Amino acid sequence: MSSYQKELEKYRDIDEDEILRTLSPEELEQLDCELQEMDPENMLLPAGLRQRDQTKKSPTGPLDRDALLQYLEQQALEVKERDDLVPFTGEKKGKPYIQPKREIPVQEQITLEPELEEALANATDAEMCDIAAILGMYTLMSNKQYYDAICSGEICNTEGISSVVQPDKYKPVPDEPPNPTNIEEILKSVRNNDKELEEVNLNNIQDIPIPMLTELCEAMKTNTYVRSFSLVATRSGDPIANAVAGMLRENRSLQSLNIESNFISSTGLMAVLKAVRENATLTELRVDNQRQWPGDAVEMEMATVLEQCPSIVRFGYHFTQQGPRARAAQAMTRNNELRRQQKKR
């Protein structure tokens, strides 16, 4: 047994309760403060939990932020500022820099005819701007001033060369108006197989309940008149993607499907792509700009679907891998060529 273990043996039979009973209230309070686990360097803890509360005074009242700020500001104003080592007197020292005038050498001096000298001397800023544009001095003006002077036979730059530092004013572009589509009426028309309804556009409607979208996909299974179905930026996820996949397996009239800018994962996209193989009428499919990148396996599946489905002639997706991109481009070229040959027949 080592000496350290022998030293610990004498504390084995000590009665801790007996020791605590013999301590005074002041000693118990000091022991309680020492046993508190504090971590002053832990930035994840609030400031009040990083150190022990050693305040003995009772609180004077609730926190008044405005009064505290006013007190701190008053204290800052009452503190005397430190005197400068070198007092500021406002005296200007030294001489101001005067750039020397550069004389133009005789070989660089240009002499014009008296008529041109008089015309340039009396030219306005707008005329000087047009002359600079004609001479190709496009660095002295903005692009708009340059092309206005070149393309127009009249003086267009009424502001002159001094206006080059001003940006061009563009007309504000208004926001796109909200989608006025009534989802309940669309769902009713799809269920009734209304022959006048050929396009279902629910783009940018972000508060559509998931059960209503699922019912719409179920109704699309038996619809024979809708040609275009668009769910762009509707916050649709994998449940909607699975409903769309079930619709594609049974619908035989849909030609265009757009589910871009949604929250569909690789699992949902894979379900849609597998369903596209069983659909022979779809000619356009757009699945780009999802919340997360679908992965290499999904991109390879996209290229395989385009190779096995000659009916698809338009596909919307930005490939990140060279292999699937080349295969998809070759498949799209072949599909469009087959479509062109079918039209010629």
Image: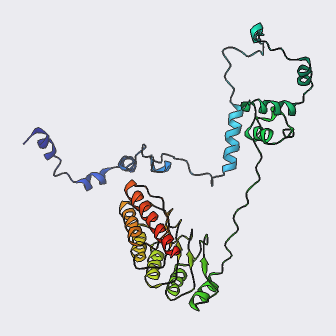
Residue occupying the point 45% across, 50% down:
44
In the picture, measured across the screen, residue 333 lies left or right of residue 12, that is right
In the picture, measured across the screen, residue 265 lies left or right of residue 229, that is left
Based on the displayed image, in which of its 4 quarters is residue 249 positioned?
Answer: bottom left
Count of numbered labels shown in the rendering? 0
Answer whether residue 105 is visible to the viewer in this image: no
Residue extending farthest to the front is 345
Residue occupying the point 48% across, 59% down:
318
Residue occupying the point 78% across, 16% down:
90
In the foreground, 155 or 52? 155
Residue occupying the point 13% across, 46% down:
9
In the foreground, 294 or 248? 248
Seen in the picture, residue 133 relative to 204 is either above or below; the reply is above
In the picture, measured across the screen, residue 198 lies left or right of residue 336, that is right
Seen in the picture, residue 236 relative to 318 is either above or below; the reply is below
Horizontal and vertical percent position of residue 52: 44, 47
Colouring scheme applied when the structure was drawn = rainbow
In the foreground, 310 or 66? 310
Residue extending farthest to the bottom is 192
Residue extending farthest to the left is 1
Answer whether residue 217 is visible to the viewer in this image: yes
Horizontal and vertical percent position of residue 113: 88, 17
| Quadrant occupied by the N terminus | top left
Horizontal and vertical percent position of residue 49: 46, 50
Seen in the picture, residue 183 relative to 134 is either above or below; the reply is below
Based on the displayed image, in which of its 4 quarters is residue 134 positioned?
Answer: top right
Horizontal and vertical percent position of residue 175: 70, 62
